Image (cartoon, rainbow, N blue to C red):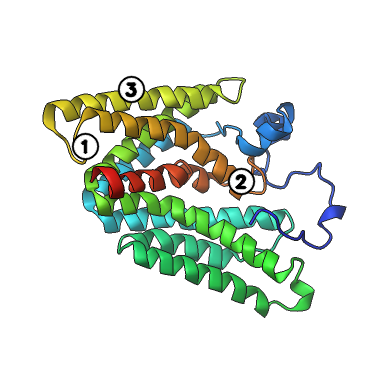
Amino acid sequence: MTAMVGPAGAASKPPAANPNRPPGVSETSSGAADRPAWVARVFAPYDIRGPKIRLGIIWFGIELGCLALGRFALGITFGLVAGVAGMQVAREWRRSGWQPSRLVSGSGALAIPVAAAFGVALVGATCLAIAAAAVVVPLFRTRRRRRTPLLGAAGTTVRCGLFAGLCGAMPVLVYRTNPAAAVVLVLLVSAYEMGDFVNGSEAAGAFAGPLAGMICVGVVAFAIGVVVTLFEVEPFNSATHAWVVGGLVAVLCPLSQIGASLVLPRAGAWAPALRRLDSYLLTGPAWLWLLWNFIA
């Protein structure tokens, strides 16, 4: 979906103006102007405005609360965040000259985690429904309102809603397979995000944050392995399983963030709800595959 026909007139827009930043934030304040082009494309600059650490702690508490309440609470909570993420991503693409449907993107992204609470089959059906709606909705636009080819608008809509929804669905699907596995996934992902943000927001290089996040994941995974050895905690049969999962999460979390950057028109586009979920993009499917085939 990356290779699409460009919107009409997009080439005539000056590239210097970046509409993807929130009002009042300059290019130099995000640090994007000093970075190589490939780094700026895949590594989002750290947004340190506001009480980010406190918000992260609150979100972690909400995740744990939803894990205690069950898969439906988890699906609704992650669905709401994914719905906001879908609309934010669609807004950024519209600012870049494309015409995704914000309604389809937002509602589709919300529906996928909720569907995940009922099963994998309903998730697949929901994804197909999003793709169908993305194709149908542009047909109702008049020719005057069409700035993007129909397939380009449909593809961008799917890009906006589908990946945000799948990010939110992953913890729910893991919970359906094994609740303890979902707790482990949330703990490891949260450890990575804590180390990544705390160290990366103060570092000059692009790799200091991810490396710190990997170290934090290693510490938490080692602790989980010790607990498994002493108390035989499900779904692990040995401490080695916990350490393997920790290594997998440590590698896939930064790759998941890069994947989320490629969903956006540029890595620095303002989509904080997507950034709240992006670490689950690849870690969730990998954890599910291990549970279905080797561990559970």
Which amino acid, mark 2?
Answer: Leu
Q: Is residue 165 above or below residue 43?
A: below
The disc, 3 or 1, on the residue closer to the chain's N-terminal end is: 3
Considering depth in this image, is 211 or 31 the residue closer to the camera?
211
Q: Quadrant of residue 136?
A: bottom right
Q: Position of residue 167 (x, y in %)?
A: 45, 50
- Check disc 1 and report the residue beneath it: 236
Q: Position of residue 119 (x, y in %)?
A: 31, 63
Q: Is residue 205 left or right of residue 152?
A: left
Which amino acid, mark 1?
Answer: Phe
Identify the secondary structure beneath mark 3.
helix
- Check disc 2 and report the residue beneath it: 262
- Check disc 3 and report the residue beneath it: 219
Q: Position of residue 278 (x, y in %)?
A: 48, 44
Q: Marks 1 and 3: in contact by CB < 8 Å? A: no
Residue under the point 51% across and 54% down: 163
Q: Residues within 10 Å of mark 2 (few under 14, many from 20)?
A: some
Q: Residues within 10 Å of mark 3 (few under 14, many from 20)?
A: some
Considering depth in this image, is 144 or 57 the residue closer to the camera?
144
The disc, 3 or 2, on the residue closer to the chain's N-terminal end is: 3
Q: Position of residue 128 (x, y in %)?
A: 48, 69
Residue under the point 46% across and 56% down: 165
Residue under the point 69% across and 76% down: 141
Q: Residues within 10 Å of mark 1 (few under 14, many from 20)?
A: many
